Amino acid sequence: MAESVDRERIAAAVRELLSAIGSDPDSVELASTPSRVADAYAEFFAGVGQDPVQHLADAVPVGERTGELVMLRDIELRSVCEHHLLPFRGRAHVAYRPGSRIVGLSALPKVVDTLAARPQVQERLGQQIVDALEAGLAPEGVLVVLEASHGCVADRGVRQTEAVTVTVASSGVLAEPEARSEAMALIGGAGARHGEGGRR
């Protein structure tokens, strides 16, 4: 849980919110809601103030033979949209072509989780993952594809429950069309299914 999260202030704010919508925060049904929301927010926003590059500190030399693409597909993604504080969730596909160092595969989901656990927008999250890998590994290139369903699209306004947003961020050699297309093919056609979009 995030130490920076002030649970008492969150609980007080939730009590006020419940009152503002016409509910009684002291009712039997809602009496525990403020503290439950405070605990949930501490989990949802545990990445605030955390440096994702810390998860790449154990990188090791790859040796003389470098350049093999490293890809981890279907990383579970959960975040909260900063516009309405509603969740969005889906999958992250992360690939990098090593420079002189590689990192344990479990570090990649940790980077994604840390950056996702804060108020976010999907369009920025992918680039932040790219930037973290660039800073921590100095790879030859990075490609990040995010596919997510957004609560602000599914549960309010247009209410498009089946809509999926796809964003692509890339750098270095994996921003070049041929290498990027090869990596996208390995991901399994995420961009082809939903529209790859432009470089972000």
Image: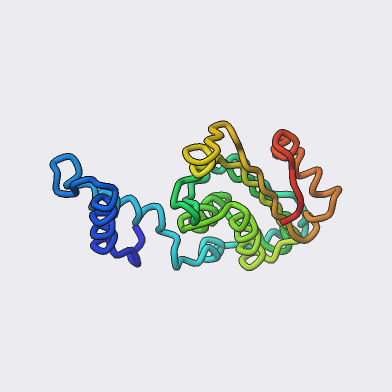
Residue 5 percent coordinates (x, y): 33, 63
Q: Residue at x 79, y 55 (%)?
A: 175
**Location of the C terminus (image quadrant):** bottom right
Q: Nearer the viewer, residue 104 or 182?
A: 182
Q: How is the image coloured?
A: rainbow
Q: Residue at x 40, y 52 (%)?
A: 44
Residue 61 percent coordinates (x, y): 66, 63
Residue 76 percent coordinates (x, y): 52, 42
Q: Which residue is drawn at 59% across and 56% down?
A: 125
Q: Determine which quarter of the picture holds residue 73.
A: top right
Q: Residue furthest top?
A: 162
Residue 152 percent coordinates (x, y): 50, 44
**Count of number-bearing discs:** 0
Q: In this view, does 110 lie to the left or right of 147?
A: left
147 w.r.t. 56: above or below: above
Q: Nearer the viewer, residue 172 or 107?
A: 172
89 w.r.t. 111: above or below: above
Q: In this view, does 19 lie to the left or right of 114?
A: left
**Location of the N terminus (image quadrant):** bottom left
Q: In this view, does 69 lie to the left or right of 130?
A: right
